Image: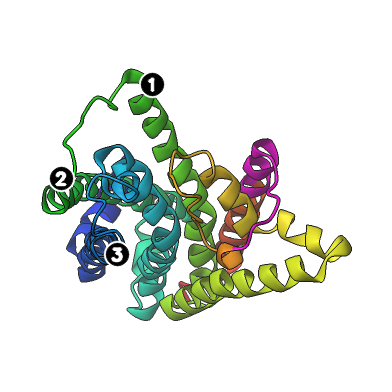
Amino acid sequence: MLRLIGAELFKLRKRKITWILLAVLIGVIILINFLLLAIAEVNFPSEPHGRMQNLLGLPVTFPLTLSILSSFGSVLAVVFLASSMGSEFNWRTIRVAVVSSESRFKLLGAKLISAAIFILIGMVLGLVTGLFISIVTTFIGGYKFDFSFASNSYLWEQFLQFWRTFYILIPYMLLGFMFSIVGRSAMPGISLGIGIIFLESVLTAFMTLAGGWIANIPDYLIAANVRTINSLSALPQNFQTGPGFGGMSVDLPNVLHATITLAIYSGVFLVIAFYTFGKRDVTG
């Protein structure tokens, strides 16, 4: 198993898509921070230490960056997992991979573990980027460099939120992974995975407006439960994070409900992926 994981890590490190997605993530984090700075300068020019301080100051760096990772990162996670698995079918290397592996299940397990490692590394690099850019925008905006917020409780909460963010990425990761196996290509995994993310947002909005029992359906979809987990962060100004709802104010499921629901979705996607790959003829 360790040999397979090492091989998958090597392949992911050598693929251009890995570095392209990382560059896109870092670019988005930088862009959002500078957009917030521009908004502050245009709308609150006379309040250099006022209303926008809580959006650009250092205390909000990690919550803001994690919110970006949870929302935009879900799309990148779909692309990354779908391409890591689907490319094997596109390049017709899946037969060689299966034959040279101890079992199909170990092959898929190695792919998932190595992809998870790279995603975790990407999240850490995203946080480092967010901290650096926050220092830059704090300097440009004329805000105070106050590090008194970095208490043990603050750091512990951000540590927990880091793993919460990774947890809510898992269903999206497995969604792209599953569709790439079912469709025998990276394209179905990417297109259907991303399509479902945005379609769910539209359906959730309409269901919420419909009222009655229909308005309760989103509680059992992915987006509402992702927002529940994200609501545990210390992000100010009632930021709406995670896909879905489009800024609508709705009642969210409780944390236990969200945790269980996301675990069920992840389990279903994982079982379908393993079952489909186990029954499929890829060596003939």
Residue at the spot 80% in from the left edge and 58% down from the top edge: 216
Q: Could you tell me the amino acid type at mark 3?
A: Ile
Mark 1: secondary structure: helix
Which of 95 and 186 lies nearest the eye of the viewer?
Answer: 186
Res 37 → quadrant = bottom left
Residue at the spot 54% in from the left edge and 77% down from the top edge: 195
Which numbered disc covers residue 135?
2
Q: Could you tell me the amino acid type at mark 2?
A: Ile
Q: Earlier in the sequence, mark 1 or mark 2?
A: 2
Crowding at label 1, few (<14), some or many (≥20) Cα neighbours within 10 Å? few
Crowding at label 2, few (<14), some or many (≥20) Cα neighbours within 10 Å? some
Residue at the spot 43% in from the left edge and 37% down from the top edge: 161
| Bounds of the magenta segment | 248-263
Q: Which residue is mark 1?
A: 153
Q: Earlier in the sequence, mark 1 or mark 3?
A: 3
Side of 151 relative to 19 (left or right):
right
Count up the numbered dots.
Answer: 3
Percent across and percent down for residue 277 are 54, 64
Q: Which residue is mark 3?
A: 39
Q: Alpha-carbon distance for marks 3 and 2?
A: 17 Å
Residue at the spot 17% in from the left edge and 47% down from the top edge: 138
Residue 217 sits inside the magenta stretch: no
